[in-house]
Each structure stands twice: as structure tokens, then as C-alpha cells.
Amino acid sequence: MKEKAGALLFWGFIAMFFLTSPLECDAAGNQLGKRQTLMKIYRVPGELLVKFKTGISQDEVKTSLAAKRARVVKKSKRSKVRRIKLPSDLSIDKAMIRYLMDPNVEYAEPNYIRYPEVIPNDVDFAELWGLENTGQVVNGVTGTAGADIDAPKAWDITTGSSSVMIAVIDTGVARNHPDLNLNMWVNSAEQIGVGGVDDDGNGYIDDIYGWDFVDNDGDPEDYYAHGSHVAGTIASRGDNVTAITGVNWTAKIMAIRAGGVSGFFTSTIAEAIYYAVDNGAKVINASFGGPGFSQTTYDAISYANDHGVLFVAAAGNDSSDNDSNPFYPSNYSLPSIVSVAATNQNDSMASFSNYGSTSVDVAAPGTNTYSTIPTFSYGPQVTVYSESFDPLPNPGVWNVSGANFTWDFGVGTGVGNTNCLEDSPGGNYLDNTNSLMYYTNSFNSVKNNRYTLSFSVQYELENPSDLFYSVTSPDGNSWWSLDYETGNSGGAFVPRAIDYTFMADLYSSFYLGFWLFSNSSQTLDGVYLDDLHLYREPININSYSYAYYQGTSMASPHVAGVAGLVKAQNPNYSHLQIRDSILNTVDSKPALSGKMVTGGRVNAFGAVTYIAPSTGVVAVGRYEFVTLSWNPNSESTITSYVLSYGTTPALGTVVNVGNVTTYQVNGLINGTIYYFAVKARADFPGLGTIEGKNSSTVTATPSPAEKVVKAVAQSGSSGGGCFIATAAYGSRMAREVRILAQFRDNFLLTNAAGRILVKYYYEVSPPLTEFIAKHDTLRAVVRWSLLPLVGVSWLALKLGPTATLVLLVLVLMSGATVAVFRKIRPQEHRG
Amino acid sequence: MQLKTIYKPLLILLVASSCAAQDSNHKENSLPISQETKIQAKEEPRLPSLQKREKNYMRGQILVKFRAGTEKVTIQFIQKKLHLVTIRIIPKSNVYLMKILNGSSVQEVRRHLMDFSEVEYAEPNYMRKGYKGPVQ
């Protein structure tokens, strides 16, 4: 019975050799060199293309190839070039030399791999220098090759995903633009729902295409073109034979209108952010900004951060330092914000761009940016107010206020000798005039209308000290200048037109008026006003087109677009990982150094192929081994992890451990400090393998024998060390015990089956151990029984598992042969 | 035209500052009001002030965040006392966008609001600019 048990244990160990050896071979067979960030394969491994000289016979070719142990994979009938498979022990470079020295060979070369860089078929792609800059002339400006975000290389990896939603908080988006419409987000719950009902319960009724927080309705149309231009850079539909492509060929653009002609407001911006976050956006682009810290906006962006939404913001266009002149929202100190400056076609900082060594993160193309816009038509025209002063208006319709004023109606001095409004009928204006003439009633604003005040004016004023202003007011108290005149109009009425659109956009109503200012040095004839008309014209989207804009407003969407690509490539990435992928892969540029945190311009290819350093690495020292564990990387393309370790921080040994997140390093010296670091590897189809950077280095020290107890205990067993052997030999430090422990650690604990065996052993052995320890005879028997096991273990440790196994098989076969021979011999005697 | 282009910003600033100076010089004086003219001066004529348009925040509006748990009646009381009316409540933030009805400045109203312990903060409704500058 004991013999059978011993045999079972023996063959169990033998089986373990098979289980453990592949891992060891794999680890040994994947020794890597120094860290490489990109291992792109440019030559087919183990192959050459060889062309023999004309006139060389088939036999000579065969002889030549046979001498080099080569095999023909394929022969081109047309070119006569043979694709040769090399013997496994011959490198391409060495084979090249051998073939080129062969007098029968015309040439030999590697079987090169060429990788495509995807270029979309959008006909105006050459205008998009920010995506690919070949040094082409764009809008009259010559660029520098490579001063771009490497979009075509990134598109080899991903062209975006319709599952990635990018919110454009802006002046709205022209959702019917032919280069945008397929990428616009549509709220299907509202689209198929009931009109006038908040079908999806998000607090907004009929928000089918997003929301307009200016007019508070579900029509975030763009009446200013800014937002449409931004959206086009992020995700104009790519490869659709239509003008341009965005950084993303495919994505979902969520249109949110938070501003118009007059600008954006804290109130609309905050609401827009909450809306974007709550309705599924993963990236927000904010191509706006200004001075003044707003807690309301800060809280809204914090909300986005808490919900995993990246916030990409323009750094501003004042050529100023944001470190000393904060520009919001890009300056808010929140981890989810990426602040973007602008570069030009030559990778220099754009002249208008703000910067900041601590407050601006990265730069992106922002000049001469070609993108989608709506074009507008206006009308039909509506006359809001008209005044010819013929007949003279009723008292009280026009009011005057100020100092030293002489405003009054003039009879027969207007256009065509009609009546008009004068500052000084019948004479000159007064010294030190500071007076306002205004229309008493306010005008109600109609949104999305263009307002124009036209009038005729004749003037003679001391130049440049005396001035005639056209003014407006939201409340009749505070007056703002819109335009002014000084000097003279040549004794004739001249037409003037002033754009009041921003007032209508900003306020529900507004006033209009005129202001005269003079000093004390000279007075002249003054001002005559006639034929005032205030018109409004509805702004209509007439058609769709493209235009060149520039600003950090155009740089920011390049980065938001790259963020979209990264999210498409790595759906499990958090917003902070997206941010890291962008900021850790910039193209460093001398012109940007010291101007921003990264000192570089964004690179889309780098961002989508970024492999984050592994995190959560823990190393625990055991008896002559160390167990390591780490967090799995989030990249979708991870294929394996590489462990580097050594007795110095230089980490001399590098092992590919496969796609695991725990690993055990054996054969270490107790009491020695070991350094460890882990990095992930990813395979990109058609491109090759890319490695991330090493994790931060951790250390562990293998411990003396008692640590094995802890190791095994932690592995799930209830026992201690090699109990039976220790009891039999009297000490853990006995040579035989240490050999068995090493065998266990090196060959059994390195695989699942072995660990189960060890665990079972530690569950059943303690009672036996106590019994054995109390009986000397039994101890001697056990020692004798363990001898074969100790011997096999020693062999395995010295020779390795494969050699030991071969040796054992040979021994067994010899034994079997002897046994058979002995069995036959007696029969022969009997016969 | 060139002169106009060059001096325009300077002149606007000059006028604004001059007006302010003249305002302060004449505050004690009553203005002469023409009785013959058909143009009506207000009964209590004010010295107007020509200003550079405020581009940083929305005049006549203020954002107010009330502390969690502030009762509606308290908010209404504060509104009435400071001549405010709610335009919108920003969802999820408990921030009220309010209109200033009595012509007080944003900063003045903000000071008064901050006297109430129920107000967590009050701030202008800042304006932000999008920029689509002309190409080079």
C-alpha cells in the first residue's frame, strides 16, 4: 500500500514537471531587451526575397538554396523573385550577407512590411493641416511637414466610435450640415416620444437634438457658426467624399447652445454642463472663456469630474499668461480639465494664444483651421421703429439729459430740407457739452434676429476732441458707446448703420440714443440726425459651407477629438486616463517649452497607442521567492505584461510573464533586496507591439524558512512548512528538507495543480506529523521512503525538469527491461 | 479713417474718464432745462454716464446659491427685500439666476446678499467669449 502511495506521489510530481515546464520555457523564451516604447515590425520574420541572376539553372538554384538550408515559400512568375523561408537559427541580416555573397544571386532583401496610413477620401483633406501637415500651403500660408497631430497614423488604430459622445457647449451646431448630420446625437427617447412631453424624464421637454440654454428650447441651432466650426473639427463625418473630416470620422456630437453673438454666461454654461453629463457625454469641449472665477461653473465642472467626464477648454486668445491672468474655465484647478493653447502651421505658438507654464496643459493646431459652418440669410425685414421727424414727434417721445445740452428739433435742416434732430439748432454747440438724447421707449428683443439701426447724419465737430456717439442701454440708466463720429461729414448727410444684434441677444429689451461730448477749446456747427430706422431681420440658415477660423477655440476641439479617439480605442478608460494618454504623449516643441505644462503639441497617434504604466504593484518576499501582483491595465489591446527585476534599481532581468496579474519569481536569495517593476504590452494589428512605461519600482526581500509557512497559509492551506519531512529529519534546515521545500516552491507552487496538491498536503499532514515525530522507528522509515523523492527533487533542481524526466524515463525503461529479462530467463530454464 | 482706427479705443477711454470727471464736478449743480423745446427733459434730470460696455458680466443679473435646506419662504423674503426676481434655477446646483429690479449694481446686491447666512455665495453672471478670429 505504501509503495502504491509513494508511486502516486512520485508520478504526481512527474506530472507537475509537465505542468510547470511550459511556464518556465515561456518565461525563458521571452527574454526581452532594454525597454522599447514601440516595436513595430518592418520585416517578415525569417523570410527573404531573393532573385537569382538570369541564366542560372534550376539545379543551381536548388543547390544554392539547399546549401543555405532555405525553403522556397513562393516564386513570382513575373518577377522571378523567390520568397525564401530561412532556417530558424539564421537571422535575416546574416542570411542577407550569405545570399549577397552568392555569385548566382542578383539581389536579396528583407520581405518588408509596409503599413498603411489611412487617408480619408474627403476632398478638402489637404486643407486640414492640423490633421496632416505635409508642408502644404493652406489659405496662403506654408506649413512645416509634421507640424500636425498625426491623425492618419492614429486612424490606423481607430477612426472613432459612434458610442463615444462629445458635447459641444457652444453657440449651437448646424445639425443638418451634410458633413455633420450623420454624427449628430439624437435623443431617440424624445424623437419617438410624444411632443410636449418629457419622454426620457431628464427635465427637458422634446430635447431631440440637444438643448438651447439661451432660448430654453430643444433647438440648439447655430446662428453664429462658432459651434458648428468647433463640431466639425471634432467629428465632421470622415471618408464620406464630402469636403472635410473631423479628428473622429465617427462619433456622436451632442449639440448644446449656451451662447450666441454676445457670448456665453455662467448660468447657461453651468446648465449646459449638467445637461451634457446627465445625458451621456464623455467629453465636453468648451471653446470659450474669460476672466472672473465663478463658483457656479466650478461646481458644474466638478460634477462632470465626479461623473467621469473630461472637460477640454480653450486657453484664450489674448496672448497673455494665464498663470498671472486667470482665464476661466480653463484655469479652474480640477483634474478633469485639459487647457489648450494654439499652435500655427509651423509648430510655433500662435501669436494670439494664451499660455501658462502651470495653468495651460497642451497645445494643438489653432490657426487657419478649415471646418464646417452654416451660412446665413436675413429677412424678411421688419421695421421696429422709424422716425423722419416729419411731422415732429410728440413731446416726451425723445428725452434729453446731461450738461450744457442744446438738443432740439430743427425745421428744414434735415435730409431734403425736412425736419431733423439737432444738437444746436441755429448755432454752434456749447463748450463742455456732455449730453444724452435718447428715445424714451425701450425696444423688445426678438431672439435670433439681426438688429440694425440706420440713420443719416451730418456733422461738424472739433477733431478729435469733440465726439458724437451712438449709444445704447439695457435699462435707460447705463449707456454704452457703439460707434462715434468726429471731424466733419463735408457739409452733407452721410448714411450710417449700427449693429444692435448683441443687445437683442443679451437683453429682453434695450434703448437707443445719441451722445454729444465737447471740450472747452472750440465749438462748431454740431450734429444733424435724420431718417432713423431700427430694423430686425430673422436670421435664417441659408446653406452649409466651410470656412477658415483661428483661435484657441479651434485648438480645443482638436484635443477633444483626440479624447474621443482614445475613448473609442479604450472604452474602459476613465476620463483621467484619457487625459493622461493625451498629456503623456505630446510632441515636445522648443517653442512651447516653458509655456505650458507638457511643453508640447498633442499627438493623436501617441494618445491612442498609449499604454499606461501598470499600477498597484505589490511584491511580497517569501522563502527564496517573491510573489507579485498588480492591477490589470485598462487598454483594450493588452496582450501580456513584462516583469523587470534585479538586485539594483537597474532591473537587469526582464521576463514576459504573459497576460496575468500575479506572478512568482523563484530562485531568489534570502535576505537580499530585490527591485521589481511591471509594464504592459499591447499588440496593434498591422502595426506591431507597443510597450508601456514601467510601473513605479517596488522592493521585496525573500525571507528565511518561516516565511514559507505564511506563504502557504496565505495560499489557502492550514498547515505549516514541509511538516512530514521536518518531523522525519528533525529540522527545517536539514538538507533534505530544504531540497523538498525548494522543489515545492519552484515546481509546485508555480502552477494551479501544484498549489492544489500542496494545499491538500498541508491539510492532511499535521496529524501525521505529530504521530511520526513521536516514533523514532517511523521517522527512520519515512526518511527512507522520502529518499527517492528527495533524489528526484534534487535532480530536478540541478538538471531542470525536462532532463530529469528523460533520465527517469530511461531509468524506468532500464528497470523494466531488466525485469522482463529476469522474467524470461526462468522460463528459458524451465523450457 | 486711419486716425479713427488708431484713436478709437483711446478716445473711448478718454471720454469715459472725462465724463466721470465732469460728473463729479457737476453733481452739485442743477441742469438748465429748456422750457421752449419740444424735447422733454426728465423732471429730475440725471447726469448720464457714458460707459464702456461691461463685457465681463451680465448687468442686472446675479447668481445666488442658497445653503441646502433654505426654505422657499426665506428665499422669497430675501428676493423681496433686495428687489430680485428669479429668472431660472440651475438644476442640481441650487443656484438661482436672479434679475435685479431696482437698478442696483451687481456688486452692491452681492454685498447685501452675503449678509444673509442662508446665502452660500452670490456672484455675477459672468460672460465668456467664444472667439473665431480672422485668419492670418
Image (tube, coloured by chain):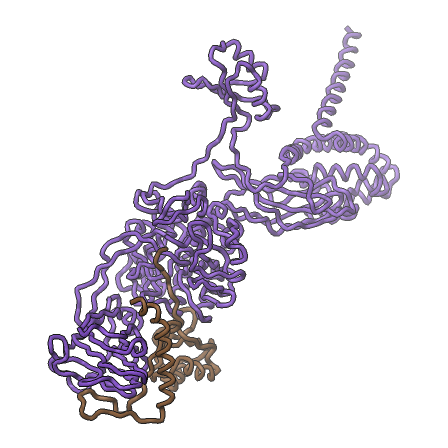
Chain colours: A purple, B brown
Q: Pick out the residue farthest to the right.
A: A776
Instruction: Write the residue at 30% across / 60% down.
Output: A222
Q: Pick out the residue farthest to the top.
A: A831
Q: Quadrant of the C terminus of chain A?
A: top right
Describe residue A360's horizontal placement relative to residue A119 as left or right. right
A633 above or below A753?
Answer: below
Instruction: Write the residue at 39% across / 67% down.
Output: B128
Q: How many marks?
A: 0
Describe residue A737's horizontal placement relative to residue B31 as left or right. right
- Is residue A428 in sight in this rendering? yes
Q: Nearer the viewer, residue A30 or A391?
A: A391
Q: Nearer the viewer, residue A398 or A433?
A: A433
Describe residue A50's horizontal placement relative to residue A662 as left or right. left
Give the percent coordinates (x, y) of residue B129: 38, 65
Instruction: Write the residue at 58% across / 49% down.
Output: A613
Give the percent coordinates (x, y) of residue A349: 46, 55
Q: Nearer the viewer, residue A40 or B119?
A: A40
Give the percent coordinates (x, y) of residue A163: 40, 50
A682 above or below A581?
Answer: above
Which of the 4 image quadrants contains residue A482?
Answer: bottom left
Which of the 4 image quadrants contains residue A757?
Answer: top right
Give the percent coordinates (x, y) of residue A428: 22, 84
Q: Quadrant of the N terminus of chain A?
A: top right
- Is residue A384 in sight in this rendering? no
Q: Pick out the residue farthest to the front.
A: A522
Q: Nearer the viewer, residue A100 or A469?
A: A469
